[in-house]
Image: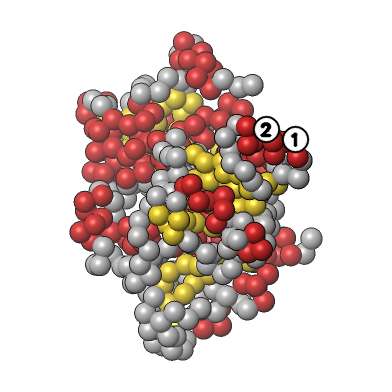
């Protein structure tokens, strides 16, 4: 069994380290820089952000001396600075995959178009990519994963985010031979489908996060994106469009996530969902077994009377755990979580307000739309608009609040890498 701590200590003792190039110095990226600063055998020698002051602030908060931070937009110069032990800030994140002295890229931007382009460039330059950008992953993750496999590099989601934390429990359950009934997360913020950057500005400021990101949390979109990532990695599906999202407690999870004939809410087993209540910030997997002896031992171990049993992790450390995914990609060629084939679930687009012809769809967590998960076969049959390619699209007709948008309702922004990858992905996987 790999020992990350010892292997990183060994690297440090040899004067070597896992070198991370970070794109995005918002709340998540800033956390990563500070977390890595207290770890052995790993460094973040270069941070890219369109706001240079934010990138510099990330280093400052990590304890890095201002004298050791330099600014450059030249690949050769950045490589030299890294070799000399400097910390580099740059506005151009697309330079990072080209650097000789970087092993792995972390995308912490949360912007689908950026994630698709950065992921493609990173793979083409034969470097590993940690895709914190779940917004891009649920649209073009499968094709990027296949490209990474072909290039001999790792494409992975991030440890610490709910999908990565759920995947750890899921892998444990499956390796033990349990049947997975449900996998999910507690939703951290109250659900408000009408949340927008103006409405949540004060709350976002208190929490120290961007207003559009807070709106994405509160309108439910982030939960949809995260559980779609789990679905695409495991084959589990939403039980109903948009998932159930019951208000419950940790103690009730195993009963709530049981079949209707057992007193629960499920129409089928093998589903993804999110829960409101005291479940957050935890993640969970509900399992079952047909073996009477195992049932006896589960009861003996105080796991309950069954037939369902709860495997629960009461925390996820988000970006603080993300460096471990970068380390595992470099040292062991392991992914924390990644699509296992074609999309299983699509994050579709729903009008947050009445829209009229000519209106342009803004970014995720904006004013126009929010996301909802559905099975991929349903989304394709109904020609539903994937959320990750919706930004910049212009309405061709009137759409009422709460209505699902279809591809023929909009004129898409087709001049983007994410759209081209999405089209290629359909041809590659649907022609198999």
Task: Work out which residue is located at the far right of the displayed protein and give it.
Answer: 432
- Element marked by disc 2: helix
Could you tell me how far apart the alpha carbons at marks 2 and 1 are, in whole angstroms? Answer: 6 Å
* Residue at image coords 35%, 34%: 33
**Left or right side of 187 for 242:** right
Q: Is residue 237 left or right of residue 290?
A: left
* Rendered position, 283 above or below 66: below
State the mark number for residue 285: none
Q: Quadrant of the C terminus?
A: bottom right
Q: Quadrant of residue 256?
A: bottom right
Q: Camera-side residue: 349 or 89?
A: 349
* Residue 229 sits above or below residue 18 on the image: below
Q: Is residue 392 visible?
A: yes
Q: Position of residue 220 (x, y in %)?
A: 42, 63
Q: Around disc 1, counting alpha carbons within 10 Å, would you say few (fewer than 14), some (14 to 19), or many (20 or more)?
A: few
Q: Quadrant of the N terminus?
A: top right
The image position of residue 324, as x and y in percent, is: 49, 31
Marks 2 and 1 close (CB-CB < 8 Å): yes
Q: Is residue 258 above or below residue 79?
A: below
Q: Residue at x 72, y 44 (%)?
A: 289
Image-based side of 219 in relation to 119, left or right? left
Residue nearest the observer in this picture, 70 or 20:
20
Please say whether residue 11 is visible from this viewpoint. no
Residue 149: x percent and y percent?
A: 68, 43
Q: Secondary structure at mark 1?
A: helix
> In the image, residue 68 lies at what x, y percent?
27, 26
Give the number of the disc on residue 297: 2
- Which residue was labeled with disc 1? 293
**Residue in the picture at 46% in, 10% down:** 13
- Crowding at mark 2 (Cα within 10 Å: few <14, some 14-19, many 20+): few
């Amino acid at each position: 069994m790999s020992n990350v701590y010892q292997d990183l200590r060994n690297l440090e003792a040899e004067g070597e380290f896992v070198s991370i190039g970070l794109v995005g110095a918002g709340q998540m990226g800033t956390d990563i820089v500070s977390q890595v600063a207290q770890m052995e055998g790993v460094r973040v020698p270069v941070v890219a952000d369109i706001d240079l002051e934010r990138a510099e602030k990330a280093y400052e908060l990590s304890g890095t001396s201002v004298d050791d931070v330099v600014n450059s937009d030249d690949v050769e110069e950045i490589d030299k600075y890294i070799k000399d032990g400097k910390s580099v800030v740059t506005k151009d994140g697309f330079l990072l995959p080209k650097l000789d002295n970087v092993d792995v890229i972390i995308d912490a931007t949360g912007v689908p178009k950026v994630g698709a382009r950065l992921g493609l460039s990173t793979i083409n330059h034969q470097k590993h990519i940690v895709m914190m950008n779940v917004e891009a992953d649920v649209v073009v993750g499968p094709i990027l994963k296949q490209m990474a496999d072909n290039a001999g590099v790792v494409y992975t989601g991030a440890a610490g985010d709910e999908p990565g934390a759920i995947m750890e429990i899921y892998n444990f359950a499956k390796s033990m031979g349990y049947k997975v009934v449900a996998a999910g997360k507690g939703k951290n913020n109250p659900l408000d489908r009408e949340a927008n950057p103006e409405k949540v500005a004060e709350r976002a400021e208190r929490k120290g996060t961007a207003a559009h990101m807070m709106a994405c949390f509160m309108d439910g979109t982030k939960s949809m994106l995260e559980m779609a990532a789990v679905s695409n990695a495991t084959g589990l599906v939403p039980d109903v469009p948009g998932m159930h999202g019951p208000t419950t407690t940790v103690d009730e999870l195993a009963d709530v996530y049981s079949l209707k004939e057992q007193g629960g809410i499920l129409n089928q087993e093998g589903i993804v969902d999110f829960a409101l209540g005291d479940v957050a910030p935890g993640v969970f997997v509900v399992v079952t077994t047909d073996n009477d002896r195992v049932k006896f031992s589960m009861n003996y171990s105080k796991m309950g009377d069954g037939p369902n049993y709860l495997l629960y992790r009461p925390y996820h450390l988000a970006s603080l755990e993300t460096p471990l995914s970068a380390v595992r990609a470099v040292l062991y060629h392991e992914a924390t979580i990644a699509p296992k084939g074609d999309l299983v679930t699509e994050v579709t687009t729903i009008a947050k307000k009445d829209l009229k012809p000519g209106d342009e769809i803004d970014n995720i967590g904006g004013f126009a739309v929010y996301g909802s998960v559905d099975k991929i076969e349903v989304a394709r049959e109904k020609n539903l608009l994937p959320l990750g390619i919706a930004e910049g699209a212009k309405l061709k007709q009137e759409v009422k609040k709460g209505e699902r948008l279809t591809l023929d309702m909009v004129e898409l922004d087709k001049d983007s890498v994410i759209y081209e990858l999405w089209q290629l992905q359909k041809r590659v996987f649907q022609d198999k």
